[in-house]
Structure formats: structure tokens, C-alpha cells
Image: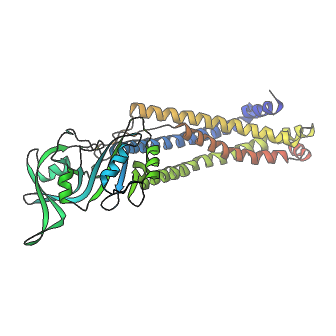
Amino acid sequence: MGFVWHVALRYFRSTRADAHIRVLSSLTAGGLAVGTAALVLALAALSGFQNHLLTDLARHTPALQVELAGSGAGVPGEAAEEPAALVAWAAATNGVSAVQELLYARGWLAVGASVQQVEILGFEKAPPVWIPVGDRAARGLIVPIAVAQKLGLAVGETVRVFSPRPGLTPLGPRPRTRTLPVAGIYRSDRADYEELPVLLPLEEAAALFAGGDRRLDLTLEPEAEQELVAGFLRETVDPAKATVVGWREANRALLFVLRLEKSLVFSAVVLIVAVAAFALLASLSLVLSSKRSEVGALAAMGAPPARLQRIFLALGALLSVGGAGLGGALGAGVAAFLDRFRVISLPPDVYIVEYVPFLVRGSDVLIVVASTVVFTGAASLLSARRASRLDPVEAMRSART
């Protein structure tokens, strides 16, 4: 063991006469450990909630869609502007297993005197995989259970569908309407505040909502990478005719808010570490004051200022790295325990999860520990520079007085 670490360990352990310094050093290291553990727990809880939300979004959001501009979209090198041309081109793209046309619109459902405004989704072949419909062979009107309960609907009953786009008749403009049977009712595990669409076949939706938003829904192969497929489609399709949208682009605003939330939580909780760094500075200053004569004697015997500085840097490293390492391990362990046994429960009728999920990421723990070491390292450097500038004669004279 070198001279620097030998002296640093001696000051770290202290003596019975300096019991108050030992207690203060222990409290400093404990404060660093508590601050680091709190920061790791906060980030783990936030990452757990965000991971649950992103997983739910990825499961209930289209993986990749092509928004058609106007009444059709074009394919490079082809003159046809019908959606069928783009469907054939997208289906031939590597990584795409199926393509179908969808139509988005808004309308009304009416049963007797009860009317409900709903979002309409017309599907071409089968209900999209990201909508939890049990019977995917159903070809009639498929409504979410919330709408069915409000209108008192059951499978087999008929309902009138109204479009905001009027139709011309000999008697003048009249609302477009269809009377359709309810072929199915589906339930989703998504949050209650999210509006779920009413599904009906594309030919019926096109007759009612000819001016709706038409899109191509792409089903990707299990091994396909969504970003690579989306990048290829963007490079080859005319942006004036179609726009390629992935689930991340569709939820760009929400993803930005999640990143901002994590940054703000990290900035707020890191103040605990900053307070602990000030405590470390006070502890090292007290050690320097108590060992002033010894430091002066070491300087008088020929210890260069750089070596004295390294002694207090090593002492600060023992306190900061030990506290940060213990806190990081403690925070990660507690987070894993709380998530494994679902200790913190939540009311399911209020939140989208029944317990507080924790997700410990190695990158988060590394950032927390590194931030703690940086804060405490700066505090150690201040004390070390004071020790290196200590005048030996004055230090030994103050000890005699």
C-alpha cells in the first residue's frame, strides 16, 4: 500500500480521540448512500411506469402505416395513383407480411332516441391486429363495450350509422345513413379515457365516409425491424402522395414529454446528492482542521504539496465511491424487491396498473453513481487544494498553541 492510501485510510478510520470525526465521516458516507439510493429508486419507478406505458402503446398502436394524400398515392416509376398500386408495392417490401387499407372517420350511432358520437374505422380484410377483437372473422359492425353499454346494444341488434357528409336526393341533401347489425362487441385493457373505434367493413365505411382519412396498415414480420422498413419506404415513396408513419412518430409528443419528465425528476432528486456533497466538504474540512499539525509535520518532512493533495483526494474517494456504490446497490436491490413482489399496490379503478412497477436500468445506475462521484469529487478537490496550500510552520505552531 502506498504512502498516500496508507495515510488516507488512517484518517478514514480515525482514532478514539477523533470519534466525532469518525461519526461525521460515517454520516457523510451514509448520506451519500441514501441520496444515491433515492435517486436510483426514483428513476427505477419512473422507468417502470414509462416502460409499461410504451409497451401498451406499442401493443395498441399501429406499428407502421402509410397515410394516403388526397384520394390516392403514387409509387415511384408508376403512373397509377390508385391505392391499389401502393398496396402492391408495400406488400412487396422486405419485412412486410400483410397490407390492408383502412379508413378513419367520425360519425354517429343511433338506437332509438339515443345518439353517440364515435370514431369509425373501416377495415378491408380483418380487424387490425392492434385492436383486441376476439372474433376476427366478424364482418359486420363491431363496437367497443363502452359504446355498447351506453346505447344498450347486444350482438345481433341493429343500429343506425350516420355520416356528417350529406347525400343528394330528389328532396335535397340528406344525411348518409346505414342500418347495420352488431356483429361483435370487444373489450380493451387500455385506459378508459381513450376513445376506441367502431369497426365496420371498408365498403360500408367508404359509402358513408367517402372523404375519410385513408391509410395503409402494414403488418410486419416478427423478425423485421420497424425502423429499417420505415426508412426504406420513406426513401422510395413520393412524399407528395403518401407519408410513412411509425408508432413512435405517431406518439412523438408523448415520447418527448416522457423524456422531459425523466430529466426533470433526475434534476430534482440529484439535489439530494448535492447536499451530501456539501456534507462531504464539511467532513473533509473538519478532518483537515483536526489533522492540521500532522499535515504540517508531513510537509515539514518533505512531503510535496501534490502528495498532500492526493491524500485528501483519496480520503474523499473512499467516502464518495463507498457511499455511491453502497447506495446504488441498495437502491437497485430495493427496486428489484418492490417490483418482484409488487409491494406498493395502486387502486385499479384509478390507475392503469395495479402496482408501482420498478425497472432498474444499468445505464441509469451508472449515471447516478457517476453524478455522485462528480459532485463529491469536486468537494474533495476543494479540501485537497486547501491541504496542499497549508504552510508547515504555521500548522505546527497552531498545534502548540
Give the tally of numbered discs: 0
Residue at image position (51%, 32%) is: 333
| Residue extending farthest top | 1
Q: Is residue 324 visible?
A: yes
Q: Is residue 347 above or below residue 239?
A: above
Q: Nearer the viewer, residue 314 or 89?
A: 89
Residue at image position (23%, 44%) is: 125
State left or right for residue 104 relative to residue 256.
left
State left or right for residue 385 relative to residue 39.
right
State left or right for residue 243 relative to residue 145.
right
Q: Nearer the viewer, residue 86 or 336?
A: 86
State left or right for residue 38 relative to residue 241.
right
Residue at image position (86%, 47%) is: 390
Colour mode? rainbow
Q: Is residue 251 visible?
A: no
The picture places residue 312, in percent across and down from the top left corner, at 77, 40
The picture places residue 355, in percent across and down from the top left corner, at 36, 39
The picture places residue 52, in percent across and down from the top left corner, at 39, 42
The quarter of the rendered structure image containing the N terminus is top right
The picture places residue 349, in percent across and down from the top left corner, at 28, 45
| Residue extending farthest bottom | 172
Q: Nearer the viewer, residue 330 or 202?
A: 202
The quarter of the rendered structure image containing the C terminus is top right
